[in-house]
């Protein structure tokens, strides 16, 4: 299990990314608009740089919802490989069966 502080830090980053998503998208649209004046584009980039660093979605780490593990995760299930195997063996994941031959 990952440290609780690390898990909470990641949750905080996710909340900030969700909060600033619309503002960030609007500023990026202005900054990349070729028809806008160079001053407006430059000001949009400056305002974008003033946003909190943790509000960027790339700062959010994919972590397991069960254990908080940062490595070996399946995006589809949002689970680490270890938690996925345990839950599949217990029959908790619909449609997933342990293979045997």
Image: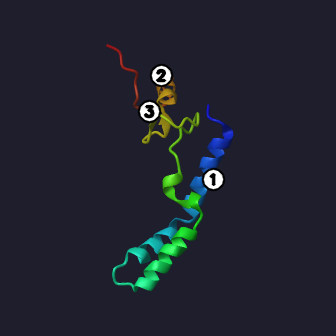
Image vertical order of residue 6 relative to residue 24, above or below: above
x then y, percent, for residue 55: 56, 60
Can you name the residue that lies furthest to the left here?
Answer: 101
Report the colour scheme: rainbow
Q: Nearer the viewer, residue 9 or 78?
A: 9
- Residue closest to the eye, 52 or 46: 46
Crowd band around label 1 with a 10 angstrom C-alpha radius: few (<14), some (14–19), many (20+):
some
Give the distance between the C-alpha atoms of the residues marked 2 and 3, in whole angstroms: 11 Å
Q: Alpha carbon of mark 2 to alpha carbon of mark 1: how far? A: 32 Å
Residue closer to the observer: 52 or 69: 52
Q: What x and y, as percent, mark residue 101?
A: 31, 13
**Mark 3 vs mark 1: which is more N-terminal?**
1
Marks 3 and 1 close (CB-CB < 8 Å): no
* Rendered-image quadrant of the N terminus: top right
Q: Which residue is mark 2?
A: 89
Q: Residue at x 46, y 69 (%)?
A: 25
Give the residue at the far right of this rendering. 5
Judge the density around disc 3: few (<14), some (14-19), many (≥20) Cα neighbours within 10 Å: few
Q: Which mark is residue 94?
A: 3
Q: Is residue 4 above or below residue 39?
A: above
Say which element carries label 2. helix
What residue is disc 1 on? 12
Residue mark closest to the camera, 3 vs 1: 1
Where does residue 58 sit, x and y in percent of width and height? Answer: 48, 54
User: SS for tag 3?
Assistant: loop
Q: Is residue 71 above or below residue 51?
A: above
The residue that appears at 34% across and 84% down in the rendered structure is 35
């Amino acid at each position: 299990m990952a440290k609780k502080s690390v898990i909470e830090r990641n949750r905080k980053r996710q909340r900030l990314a969700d909060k600033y998503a619309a503002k960030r998208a609007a500023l990026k649209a202005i900054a990349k608009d070729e028809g806008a004046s160079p001053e407006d584009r430059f000001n949009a980039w400056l305002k974008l740089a003033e946003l909190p660093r943790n509000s960027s979605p790339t700062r959010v780490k994919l972590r397991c919802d069960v254990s908080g593990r940062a490595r070996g995760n399946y995006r589809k299930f949002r689970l680490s490989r270890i938690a996925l195997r345990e839950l599949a063996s217990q029959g908790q994941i619909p449609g997933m069966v342990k293979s045997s031959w």
